[in-house]
């Protein structure tokens, strides 16, 4: 069956590349993927799959195999980012200020390719496969939560997904059990002082000076309050105040994010950011408003599922191509699916120094090496067969 999969992957690769280029040229922002989801739904319907639209612009296709077995879900995200593209590609974004700068166009095309391959083998497959095309991964609260609430993973036994990863060289794949990607939250602090004239500062309560002390104090949380063996980040990424040289403003706004794996560390960060902000403000005669929003939970790969993906990747790409890697402090809302069923999320190398595909994700010149696309299709297709076949065997053993 592996030879059949490889042949079908080769056959669909030109389409996958063409799909990726079409999607790259027509990016849509989070929860606005109207044309993208229509494109995806049409391609899936042409495969004679049962296609539904369970939440917003999401798309789900269901493939039922020729015999009984477990249910596998495979996920891809579809949204783009509010970035003006500067790649110079012949298929660069035609939508001003919007760009596929994270590889989601590749993810969508890879899953369409995998659906094509597996649909051509459906009579030989046990169980069921659900192809999950998610909107809004780049914007809180993320599209996965709504899909989960709509029941797309009800009855699912296993979930898998991947992310094209430019820092990882083409031809390699990170397959890591346990912690992979961190949880990520956001916070906002509004420092409320008293405005006044720059020439009479004693009559004002300067929120800029006070806010600067808040920013400095926040850096001590991770350095002195978090166990050094627990990774954590408190990052201030925005400071906005004032509009005139001669005026001390009445307020200043501080925004930022936190990343961590441990729920206990998450609780600590949420509490201490608010306490520190309030304390610094009170010391200097100001008050503050504090908001903390929990975003995506950490991705912690299931050991057994990851072992299956590891075997598949080694057979497909060779032992040297598979690396364990290390946990990364970026977030991804695949975690919403992973909380409902044993799951594995992998990072597929898409960078290549030779043609200069070296820009980081979310950069105006970001690109992927398209040779990674058939690798993703093959990984998904082989993994689906491995997981479904092994699950069917376990069902048989359980009933005998």
Image (cartoon, grey):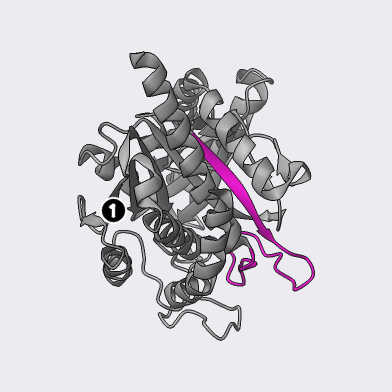
* Residue 353 is covered by the magenta coloring: yes
**Residue 197 at x, y percent in the picture:** 44, 57
* Residue 225 is covered by the magenta coloring: no
Q: Secondary structure at mark 1?
A: strand
Of residues 116 and 371, the one drawn nearer to the viewer in this rendering: 116
Residue at image point 25% right, 33% down: 154
Of residues 42 and 266, the one drawn nearer to the viewer in this rendering: 42
Q: Is residue 17 above or below residue 216?
A: below
**Residue 120 at x, y percent in the picture:** 39, 59
Q: Is residue 44 above or below residue 73?
A: below
Q: Is residue 210 above or below residue 261?
A: below
Q: Could one spot residue 141 in this view of the protein?
A: no
Magenta region, mostly helix, strand or loop?
loop
Residue at image point 26% right, 64% down: 45
Of residues 291 and 25, the one drawn nearer to the viewer in this rendering: 25
| Left or right, residue 357 beside residue 55 | right
**Residue 221 at x, y percent in the picture:** 59, 26
| Left or right, residue 194 beside residue 14 | left
Residue at image point 41% right, 61% down: 116
Work out which residue is located at the far bottom of the displayed protein and give it: 90
Q: Which residues fall within the magenta stretch?
A: 344-371
**Residue 253 at x, y percent in the picture:** 43, 48
Residue at image point 58% right, 78% down: 86
Which residue in the structure is indicated by mark 1? 61
Q: Quadrant of residue 376?
A: bottom right
| Left or right, residue 368 beside residue 382 | right
């Amino acid at each position: 069956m592996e030879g059949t999969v490889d042949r079908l992957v080769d056959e669909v690769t030109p389409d996958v590349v063409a799909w990726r280029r079409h999607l790259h040229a027509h990016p849509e922002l989070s929860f606005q993927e109207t044309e993208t989801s229509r494109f995806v739904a049409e391609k899936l319907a042409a495969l004679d799959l049962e296609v539904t639209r369970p939440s917003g612009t999401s798309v789900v296709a269901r493939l039922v195999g020729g015999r009984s077995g477990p249910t596998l879900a495979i996920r891809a995200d579809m949204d783009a980012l509010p970035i003006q593209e500067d790649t110079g590609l012949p298929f660069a974004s035609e939508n001003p200020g919007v760009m596929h700068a994270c590889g989601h166009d590749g993810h969508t095309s890879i899953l369409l390719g995998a659906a094509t391959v597996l649909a051509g083998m459906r009579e030989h497959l046990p169980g069921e496969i659900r192809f999950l095309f998610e909107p809004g991964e780049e914007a809180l609260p993320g599209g996965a939560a709504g899909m989960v609430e709509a029941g797309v993973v009800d009855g699912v036994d296993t979930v898998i997904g991947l992310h094209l990863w430019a820092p990882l060289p083409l031809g390699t794949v990170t397959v890591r059990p346990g912690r992979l990607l961190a949880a990520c939250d956001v916070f906002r602090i509004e420092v409320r002082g008293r405005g006044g004239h720059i020439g009479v500062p004693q009559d004002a309560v300067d929120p800029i000076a006070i806010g600067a002390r808040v920013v400095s104090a926040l850096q001590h949380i991770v350095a002195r309050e978090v166990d050094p063996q627990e990774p954590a980040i408190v990052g201030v990424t925005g400071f906005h105040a004032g509009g005139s040289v001669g005026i001390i403003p009445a307020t200043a706004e501080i925004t930022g994010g936190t990343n961590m794996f441990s729920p206990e560390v998450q609780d600590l960060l949420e509490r201490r950011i608010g306490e520190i902000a309030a304390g610094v403000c009170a010391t200097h005669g100001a008050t503050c408003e504090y908001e903390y929003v929990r975003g995506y939970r950490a991705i912690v790969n299931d050991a057994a599922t990851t072992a299956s993906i590891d075997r598949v990747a080694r057979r497909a790409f060779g032992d040297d191509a598979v690396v364990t890697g290390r946990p990364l402090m970026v977030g991804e809302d695949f975690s919403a699916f992973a909380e409902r069923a044993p799951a594995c999320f992998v990072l597929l190398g898409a960078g290549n120094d030779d043609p200069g595909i070296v820009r980081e994700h979310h950069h105006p010149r970001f690109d992927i090496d398209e040779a990674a696309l058939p690798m993703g299709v093959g990984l998904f297709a082989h993994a689906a067969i491995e997981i479904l076949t092994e699950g069917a065997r376990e069902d048989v053993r359980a009933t005998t």
